[in-house]
Image: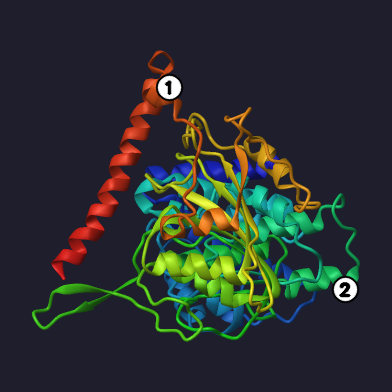
Amino acid sequence: MTEALVSKVWSYCNVLKDDGVSYGDYLEQLTYLLFLKMADEYSKPPYNRKIDIPKEYRWETIVSKRGAELETHYVSLLREFGQKSGMLGKIFFKSQNKISDPAKLFRIVQMIDQESWVKLGSDVKGDIYEGLLEKNAEDTKSGAGQYFTPRALIKAIVECMRPEPEKTIADPACGTGGFFLAAYDFLTNKDNYQLNKDELQFLKYKTFKGWEIVPNTARLCLMNLFLHNIGDLDNLAPVERADSLIADNGLRFDYVLTNPPFGKKSSMTFTNEEGKDESEDLIYNRQDFWATTSNKQLNFVQHIHTMLKVDGKAAVVVPDNVLFEGGAGETVRKKLLETTDLHTILRLPTGIFYKPGVKANVIFFDNRPASKNAQTKEVWIYDFRTNIHFTLKKNTLKYEDIKEFIEYYNPANRHKRKEMWSEKNPEGRWRKFAHEQIIARDKTSLDIFWLKDKSLTDLDNLPDPDVLATEIIENIEAGLESFKGIIEKLGK
């Protein structure tokens, strides 16, 4: 039953692809129609919920039409719902019909109408939707990949953090909701917790809070959460469509799990006197920030620190520049080492993100009350990058690949860790550095590595040509990104 449904949804996606409709556009239309069908199911027995959908736009009015009449009705419905408040308005904000062929639109409506979606398990609905999101991320031309973090990495991060019931979890750049869903899976896993009624209610309505600046991505995220049984039609949406960096909203959380968007600068585009578009570095002047900078990632790290409760914990994916950049970067690192316990860094391999040339890490830090002494005593680093390479197609990152890191991290008691590196074992990937060693480094750099890159020394055992070629392309693309930033600065 499940497999048949999945393949039905998929096969239709391929029919539309031949018609020039992208995965993203298909996903979007599916989102609108699924939402309307499920709202209709909830309004009937045994649920009998009061659903805020006008009579003239209920599901039966869509199913009963076809051809040009269906298309006109659907366009009118999207426009009307986009002006509503609550979750309805959030999902239909600026919605448009992207399926120009009324016959194909009719077929999607019929496909959705044949199923009772509410009765399906959230894992079934979720699997269909997550699969489509991943397909959408693979469609490199659309650029959707930058909102999609590898699910194996997210799962490993959540396993390390071990979120607890009735604690709040935030993501200030939530994309399509990957961290929320992995945390939800962890909390509902019977091997981890046996949740009582109150804890389940808290999980559904109060655990998650997200922000996403891109309207389409926020819409996909809301639908993804809704299909996984998080949030509700009648309640406030758990995701806000907003730039979370603009201000401190005063909310504080137990956990912040996030992968802020790559791309170094925050910028704002405006039209100059000659009618040409110009961009200007966007600098957030916030009293709670340690440094004023247009570097987006450094701003996110500072914002995340603000969002944490006094004993809150964070895991953040950051590009390499956050670990070594001078100026504001050095200030932010010093302050993090002073005010939080920045206990772990996971150096990520290349070839796992849809945006090419990205070299990234996960930093784990626990907030601490104010103190005269630096709160970070030692930093543990796991080098999961040197001599390791993944690709998005042939050799994808799997959860099993990161299991060793989770074991070394020791989530049950991270204060009882065992170093794998030693003078006798210089190839050990798990090594600790004392606070004194780090602050003695130039610019307090946390970009620390000690393993030898074998591809530079062992010419007889080079990687496969396609891996080498991919690495070269990634390095060139990373270099180009840096040069673009320099040219922009020189232009100003």
| Residue 115 in view, yes or no | no
* Type of the residue with mark 1: Pro
Q: Position of residue 431 (x, y in %)?
A: 62, 42
Farthest-out residue, top: 460
Q: Position of residue 176 (x, y in %)?
A: 55, 60
Give 230 or 28, whichever is nearer the viewer.
Answer: 230
On-image quarter of the N terminus: top right
Residue at label 2?
A: 198
Question: For the residue labelled by badge 2, is the local secondary structure a helix, a strand or a loop?
Answer: helix
For mark 1, does the 10 Å Cα neighbourhood hold few (<14), some (14 to 19), or many (20 or more) residues?
A: some
Q: Is residue 246 above or below residue 147?
A: below
State the count of labels: 2
Give 73 or 245, whichever is nearer the viewer.
Answer: 245
Question: For the residue labelled by badge 1, is the local secondary structure a helix, a strand or a loop?
Answer: loop
Q: Residue at x 49, y 84 (%)?
A: 247
Q: Position of residue 209 (x, y in %)?
A: 63, 73
